[in-house]
Image (cartoon, coloured by chain):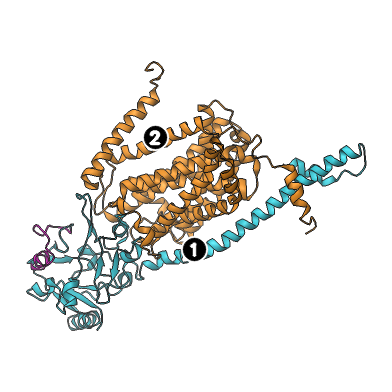
Amino acid sequence: MARRFAFSFWKIMAGVILAAGLVSTVIRFTMGLGSSTNLSDDFPWGLWIGFDVLTGVGLAAGGFTLAAIVYIFNLKRFEPIIRPTILTAFLGYVLVIMGLMFDLGRPLQIWHAIIMWNPRSVMFEVAWCVMLYTTVLALEFAPVVLEKFKLTRTIALLKKISIPLIILGVLLSTLHQSSLGSLYLIVPDKLHGLWYSSLLPVFFYMSAIAAGCGMVIVESTLSSRAFKRGVEVHLLADIARVCVVVLGMYATLKLMDFSGDHKLGLLFQPRMETYFWWAEFLIGVVVPMVMFVQQKVRTSPSGLMTGALFVVVGFILNRMNVTITGMEGWTGATYIPSWMELSVTVSLVTVGFIVFAYAAKYLPLFDHGHGHEAPDEFDIVRDLNTVSRTS
Amino acid sequence: MGSKGMLIDMTLCIGCHACSEACKAENGLPGEPGPKLSDTTYTVVEEYNGTFVRRLCQHCQDPTCVSVCPVGAFTKTEQGPVLYDESKCIGCRYCMQACPFQVPRYEWSSNNPRVSKCIMCAPRLAKGLPTACSEACPTGATLFGDRDELIRIAYERMAAEPDKYVQKLYGQQEVGGTSVLYLSSVPFEQLGFKTNLTQAALPQLTWNVLSKIPTVVAVGGVMLYGIWWITNRRDMVQQVEAQQARGNHAASKGGNHVPEPVHQAEERI
């Protein structure tokens, strides 16, 4: 049986990462945050908030974006990629919650937000969005699991509430993505002017949609390689178009905000923050836009993948800039995550990949849409007979 | 009875640290007062070129920590102190992140950490006593009293000796005003004070957005449902038309009334 276990490079890597993550986890929960992280009184939020939470939630934005495209806008041709996308979002949110359990000083009291309310707090909004949207994602993904076990009656029940559920999911995501930006509205003096803006919630929302599009392309490409399926180039090309439009709106609003607040000068100061801002803007906005407006990029699987990777990396840079680069100057602190913080973060991502791979192997993630979703023509005819066509 | 406060006149401070020692004794905090605020030091005296500056929680009038805490672990009492309830705290540290004065400290070495900061001797105030630090101050550099009264005293001092004092009462306006006020003979920015702080209370910045949530949910919900209603109906109509067209085809082969829009509709699908 050892013979059947192929020790590929990636399996060894995953093993090493998870082992390091396990050691860090033990240290974190036995000796506290001080021993495991490089956080300090001057720099209380680090990698776990910046990457695991802020970035993780953003990268899960493909879930609500595609759900809206397929079910609200009824563009059913995108249906073949909806299930893996919803799964990615669901796993993303579960990992965000796990990351939070590491970061919270008193993780066992996380449930307090349910009964101890403070509606003036953005963090209170964030807490409720995480709870509710994770539930919604679980329900959105549930039919895939139920199908596996042939629980058709429960599926039918879920189908009845599917549209209100999707709408709720889009609303919660809208609130959640933007609220992560709103978290920083309260630090007008601390956060560097390149990132602070009264439009932070809008920027977080728009950039999350762009990153969500990027993630749909990345995740579809990766799974098509891993499972030897063809890439749905025509679908991903359309997602890339959406991405260009959203990035264009984002860039326009961003530059108008700079000029409106008379902050254009900040873009040309020879400072560390400036370089990081340009890196984020060029990698995450300019380069992918230039790529995706070209048809030859949109119709090539590797072009799509490269452009989408730029979007995702630029997005990660943006969130790390808000949480770390933009906050260091005022607080006078320098923060570099400890190996324990890094290993926990990388472990969580690794767990996400492993769970996705197993789900793809054992659940009907890709091979659906050949019947069970096809509308029953007679049902529709019957329904329509009761609807006046001229109304 | 108005809200209480403390006026710290830095021209009178001799840097004897009596305040921080009294604070340690009053609050049962272990160790000697360090050079900086810590989880066991609520107040310290720092020196900037011969001027002594006392650091402690400013007890804002509209405190940022109170507004940002998701579980309401912070409260601003009517008497002035801003208090922290560790039994509610989940440890998200948003209070530390958001505090414009970087005051809250954390028990980083604990496995069940608390936030720590000056509580303006709330138990003493409740008994009608002044804060321990102001009582211990030998020179009157820390004056305890009603905030309105302290502001009046501060302006009297600035008016009486305009050459001595910087004409600024730090804490009167900063982030909407604080219960702890400072007078100085040296420009505040040279003493480690943040002098470019917003004048308005910070909680309004997030409330501007939070208060719009009901609108976003209501309007967004109606809009999304409306879009679904329209697109879904369009789909159903197209399918029926396609069906009828097929039926017509079968019924009258070569007939002349195949509906034109059907082909367009099918192409769009």
The answer to whether one can see residue B136 in this image is yes
A78 w.r.t. A114: above or below: above
C-alpha distance separating marks 1 and 2: 35 Å
Q: Nearer the viewer, residue A332 or A206?
A: A206
Colour of chain A as rendered: orange
Q: Amino acid at mark 2?
A: Thr
Q: Residue at x 29, y 33 (%)?
A: A20
x and y, in percent, of residue A391 in the image: 77, 59
Q: Secondary structure at mark 1?
A: helix
**Quadrant of the rendered structure where residue B85 is?**
bottom left
x and y, in percent, of residue A311 in the image: 49, 41
Residue marked by disc 2 = A350
Image quadrant in which the C terminus of chain B is located = top right
Colour of chain B as rendered: cyan
Residue marked by disc 1 = B213
Report whether B61 appears left or right of A356.
left
B80 w.r.t. A268: above or below: below
Which chain is mark 2 on?
Answer: A
